[in-house]
Amino acid sequence: MPKKINNKTIFSLLEVTNSIRKTLEERYKSAFWIKAEMNKLNHYSQSGHCFPEIIEKVNGKIIAQIKATLWRDDYQNINRNFLRILKEPLKDGIKILFLAKISFDPSFGLSLQIIDIDPQYTLGDLENEKRETIKKLQLEGIYDKNKKLELSFLPQRIAIISVATSKGFGDFIDVIDKNSWNYKFFYLLFPSILQGDKAVTGIIAQLERIKKVIHHFDAVAIIRGGGGDVGLSCYNNYELAKAITLFPIPVITGIGHVTNETVCEMFAHTNAITPTKLAEFLLQKFHNFSVPIQKAKEKIADKSRRILSEENTKLESELKLFRSITVNILNTNENQIKNASYAMQQQ
């Protein structure tokens, strides 16, 4: 109860916070859906609970933020849905539509208790970004610039944007280094983060580095291991897609997934669904050159053998004829000499 001191009504902090809690409980009795961005998930593996940071941005500036709680059982159910629909776990830096109740505790303050999150909203947000990027590049008339570049007849010198420890990078190198035809490639790694908020600036920065030594390369390969749609959202970014489509040499991609193509893959010169398939594409370019050469080599050798055989047969025939005529001439001349000798003896 409040106390009266010097004509002042004085409340304890607990009384004030309890009053706030009571007011909020009476005003917000039911759960409601909220759209926002999950800045940090803050999952604690020991307890299984999460304490997300929820924010809203306008033009990159945070205009609202609040703490939230996501208890273990709810988190596990939500995470299973994300894995099933997006092929990615619940994670930092994604836009979400979530069902929550307002919660106020005198010790911990105001927060939202998250009950459910709709993965379809997150997926839809990614699709909207993708459509907007495609539309902007088409309006600028630059969406097919990279596709129109001519890829070297034998693309041997490859600048690779990837991570050295990436399985996709390892698969790519394994295929081209150990090819049974002994085709030789030169490649150089330009390391970059391949997913998340920092991927866009990282990949663009490496493209700028490659530009400075561009005369050393026939193509740029962007290589990443497998992943779901959320991990690939950076490849729908307008700035990154624009940097790729305007790049002065062909950009080839092996992003490593089997879902719908991202914008960067659509507007790159060539796209393969996995790093392995991209390596096989390069090997096929060599096949397209070497197989006809090998066939021509075999054809030339076969025709040479036939010509030599035919000429050898003709030579042997000419030799037989030459021997026969020579023998006849010798015999005729020998008889003539004998007759002339006999006649001289008679005379």
Image: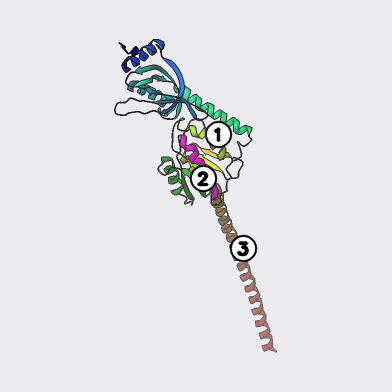
Residue 331, magenta (yes or no):
no
Measuring 66% from the left and 82% from the top, which residue is drawn there?
337
In this rendering, the answer to whether 169 lies above or below 216 is above
Q: Position of residue 271 (x, y in %)?
A: 53, 38
Q: Amino acid at mark 1?
A: Tyr
Q: Position of residue 78 (x, y in %)?
A: 39, 22
Magenta residues, dominant SS class: helix
Question: The C terminus appears in which quarter of the rendering?
Answer: bottom right
Tag 1 residue: 238
Nearer to us in this view, 343 or 304: 304
- Dividing the picture into quadrants, the one containing residue 225 is top left
| Dot 2 crowding, Cα within 10 Å, few <14, some 14–19, many 20+ | some
Nearer to us in this view, 201 or 9: 9
Q: Position of residue 341 (x, y in %)?
A: 66, 85
**In this rendering, would 148 be left or right of 109?**
right
**In this rendering, would 338 be left or right of 18?**
right
Q: Which residue occupies the extreme front position in the image?
A: 6
What's the coloring here? rainbow
| Dot 1 crowding, Cα within 10 Å, few <14, some 14–19, many 20+ | many
Tag 3 residue: 314
Q: Are marks 2 and 1 in contact (CB under 8 Å)?
A: no
Nearer to us in this view, 188 or 183: 188
**Residue 312 appears anywhere in the view:** yes
Q: Amino acid at mark 3?
A: Lys
Task: Provide the residue span drawn in magenta.
Answer: 194-213
Q: Amino acid at mark 2?
A: Leu
Determine the CA span between mark 2 and mark 1.
Answer: 28 Å
- Dividing the picture into quadrants, the one containing residue 48 is top left
